[in-house]
Structures are given as structure tokens and as C-alpha cells.
Amino acid sequence: MKFDLNLAQRNDVWTSLVKQLESYYSETDKHKASVYPSREEVVRFLNADFENPIPVEVAIEQVIKGLTDYAVHTPHPQYFGMFNPRANFPSILADVISAVYNPQLAAWGHAPYAVEIEHLLIQEIGKKFGYRSPDIDGVFATGGQEAHITGLLCALHEKYPDFASSGVRGLKKQPIVYCSSASHHATIKAARVCGLGGEAVKYIPVDEKQRMLVSELERQIKEDEAAGLQPFFVFATMGTTGSGAIDPIKEINEMAEKYDLWVHADAAYGGAVRLTDSYSKLLDGIEGADSITFDAHKWLSVPMAASLFITKHRYVLGKAFSISANFMPEEEDEIDRLGSYTHSIQWSRRFIGLKLYLPLLVFGWKGYEETIMHQIRMGDYLRQALQKHGWNIYNHTQLPIVCFTDERLEDDSDFSKFIYEKTLEKGNTWIINYPYEEFATLRACITNYNTQENHIDNLVNWLNENRKEYLKTPAEAGV
Ligand SMILES: *Cc1c(COP(=O)(O)O)cnc(C)c1O
């Protein structure tokens, strides 16, 4: 059949593709880290013509060129950006293997081995967070966003027994969701997707380290109760995207106990420290949360999209996602329970878990611990290198995220913008301007396990040069 190509063609394509991919993978640092083409240029390059098919080699060449020239190179060791990792090699192979076998994970019977692998990973990672089997359940999701939505839906079904049939229409009191003002906006999107609306989310102020002020949480809960609303859910962020802040989860758990809230720990990024001995304790108390979001496609260095939703309420996913009329979660067959069509927002499902299983088989927990520790050390090195060259650090975290600027320019958002625009223009690195409290800081994060001291030195040198360039125009800079 034409769709298969023939064996000889396939052999040629595999060979040449592997060569091209390997050249990118082993020499990622020969490329620019960032690009910022005009939209016209990209559309012009795209130039797709489905009326006139082209040979597969030509098509692949085109795609590789497009991805090389028109993408921020997140696998680059001088990409100091958001939590987009370089993908470790076994996890890349996993994506290829999944695509070839294309197992359907909706039901255990269709892909028993794959379903059992995901089940095992949920159990093992659940234990890392301090949950106890056999209570642990969970599901692989496409990302933190889907895991958040899953958590909110579980809580709604748990709290409101008729939610599966009547949804938000049946609620007597409006449910209220809390998160800190420094939390990821996936919280508000989750509330909107679940039909609660953005106004159901109340942002709680943070302290000087950007951690949720639990006294303010309680004040807001009381105010909402008095207004006839129903406080019912709180997101606790275990490592904020902007500055790596970790909410005081033990106190949040106590508050949840007192007011009957569901606690969802957003450990999308920070959850990785649970795989280390030395930093695991930063997340102590997370075992008290009802459910957790943990992204594998961030600090576990696997390709997008891979996240874990984990809960200590074994039957709640079935309550939320099984569609059979008389579904009794406690009575469900264990094998039904494992198939995702009763346990996930998704129906047909890709084998997401293999991206984590293969690297764990190859490197083990120890291998993960080593790379995570390396990145934490590189974060320390970055802080020291910046301070040595007269840059001031504004955030407070042990995670490798640094919010910084020159103290003389801390009120000058033109400066942070200047630096950000320069990164796009020159393309040798990628960092972002991110306001920390009232300060116009820049944010750099170690997201790549291959980032070494020399890459950090390059970043700091480059920052120093640009600061000099900016300060040459004191009239504009206002200093
Ligand atoms: C990235 C992130 C999210 C959103 O997760 P996605 O995987 O991008 O959908 C939520 N919370 C935090 C803290 C994050 O860093």
C-alpha cells in the first residue's frame, strides 16, 4: 500500500532522517537559541501545495529546515527560558515507538502492557509524593493544563454528588476556587473550561517571597461564606513559574481541613525535586493534598506533551469520567478501572507514559536525581556569576530560577525590555523580562541538563555587554 512506502524507500528515509536528527541533537549549540522571523517570512516558506505531492525526502527536508530556522531552540544549552526541556534520548525513542505501534490505551484489553506501565508509573510517582498505595490513582494527561482540569472535575464530582448529571446548573451555591496571585494562569483556564467561569477564581495575595498568605486565604474564605458562596477548592503551587516560590502547603492543608476544601498541588515544575534526597523536603506536606499535577515534559526532560495527574482518592476519577448510567466506582472491575476511557478526559489515548518509562529503565531514579541536582547546582552558579558582575537577585528560591536586574535599573522596564528584545535579535540565548513584585527584572531558568558553567558565563558576558550598551544612552535610561 502506498501509505507504507516500500521497504527500500523506508530504509533510505530512516537512514537519512536519523542522520539529520542526530546532527541537530549532537550539535544543538551550533544553532541560534532564539529566532524571531516575521510572519510573512514563515508563511512564505510554508508554501504547502496538497494538489501536487512531493517525494518524502523533499518533504522531510522542508520540515527540518522549517523547524531549524523558525523555532526557538528549547533543547539548546543557552535557552534559559520557560520550563521547556531538552528531551533525553530514550524519551525521544519512546515517542517513535509509540507512533509505530500506536497502542490504544482507552481500554486495558487493547493495550494491557502499555496500560500497566502507566499504572505502575502513577503508583511509583505517587509514592514519591508520599501517597500510600493502594489508595493512589491517577492518569497521564497531555499537560499541566489538562491535569488541572482533571483535578477540578474530580473535586466537583466528589463535593457535589449530582454533578455528573446536572453539572453546574444543579449547584445551589456557587463554588469558589482559590490560588495565589503568583500562580500559573492554568488555574483560571481550568475554572473556565469546567464551566465555573473566571470569576469563580479568587487570587490570594502573596508574601515577599511570593508564597500564598494563608491568613489572607482564611479571610477570603470567611468573606465568601458570609456572601453565600461555597469555598471548595484551592491550588497550592509547588514552584511558581515566575520565581520558583513554594506555597506553605501544610498550612493550606490545615485550612482545607477546617473549611472542607479540596487541595490540588500544582507541582507541574517543582515536583521533580521529590526525586532527590537533598531537596525533596521542600515539598513536605504535599502528601496531604487531595491531588497533584506533575509535568514530565518539564523537569523530567521528556518531549511534550506529558503530565501526570495523581490523586489519593482511588475512586474519584471513575466518578468524574465514567459515563455508564449506574456506575458504582467502588464496585468497578479493577481492569475497567485501569482503562482510561473511564478515567480520563480523553477517550482514544496515546501511550504518553512510555516517554517516562523508557528513561527510567535506562537511567533509573539515580540518573534523574543526578541531572536534577546538576541543574540545581547550575542555578546556584548562575546566581553567583550574576552577583559577581553587579547584578542583583530579587526572588527567593533554591530552584534554578533567577529573577535579576541591575539595582540601578530595577525600576526601568525599558531596560528589561531592551534585554529581552536583544535576545531575540541576536539569538544566542533566550531569557525573558518578568516583573518581580514592583521590580522590572529579567528571568533566567536552567531548563536543560546539558547547560554547563561555560554557557552561563556566556549569558552573563552577554548581559554585561548589553547593559553597557544600554547605559551609554543615559538620557533614555534615566540614570
Ligand atoms: C507549566 C505550568 C503549568 C501549565 O502546564 P502545561 O503543561 O503547560 O499545560 C501550570 N502550573 C505551573 C506551575 C507550570 O509551571
Image (cartoon, rainbow, N blue to C red):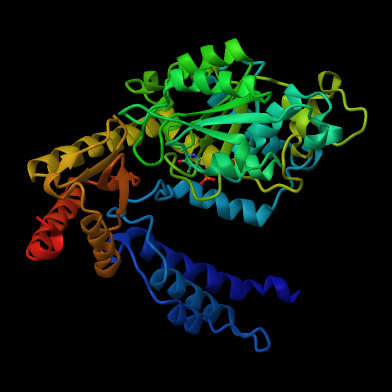
Q: Position of residue 173 (x, y in %)?
A: 74, 27
Going 43% across and 75% down the picture, which residue do you hit?
A: 65
Q: Quadrant of residue 438?
A: top left
Residue extending farthest to the front is 227
Q: Is 234 drawn above or below residue 103 in the view shown?
A: above
Going 21% across and 48% down the picture, which residue do you hit?
A: 411
Q: Quadrant of residue 234?
A: top right
Q: Quadrant of residue 344?
A: top right
Q: Quadrant of the C terminus?
A: bottom left
Residue extending farthest to the bottom is 52
Going 42% across and 26% down the picture, which residue do you hit?
A: 212
Q: Is residue 227 left or right of residue 293?
A: right
Q: Is 351 drawn above or below residue 70 in the view shown?
A: above
Q: Position of residue 450 (x, y in %)?
A: 30, 47
Q: Is 440 drawn above or below residue 2 in the view shown?
A: above
Q: Position of residue 152 (x, y in %)?
A: 65, 33
Q: Position of residue 132 (x, y in %)?
A: 59, 14
Q: Is residue 166 left or right of residue 81?
A: right
Q: Nearer the viewer, residue 361 or 410?
A: 410
Q: Quadrant of the N terminus?
A: bottom right
Q: Is residue 62 visible?
A: yes
Q: Is residue 146 visible?
A: no
Q: Nearer the viewer, residue 84 or 28?
A: 84
Q: Nearer the viewer, residue 240 or 116?
A: 240
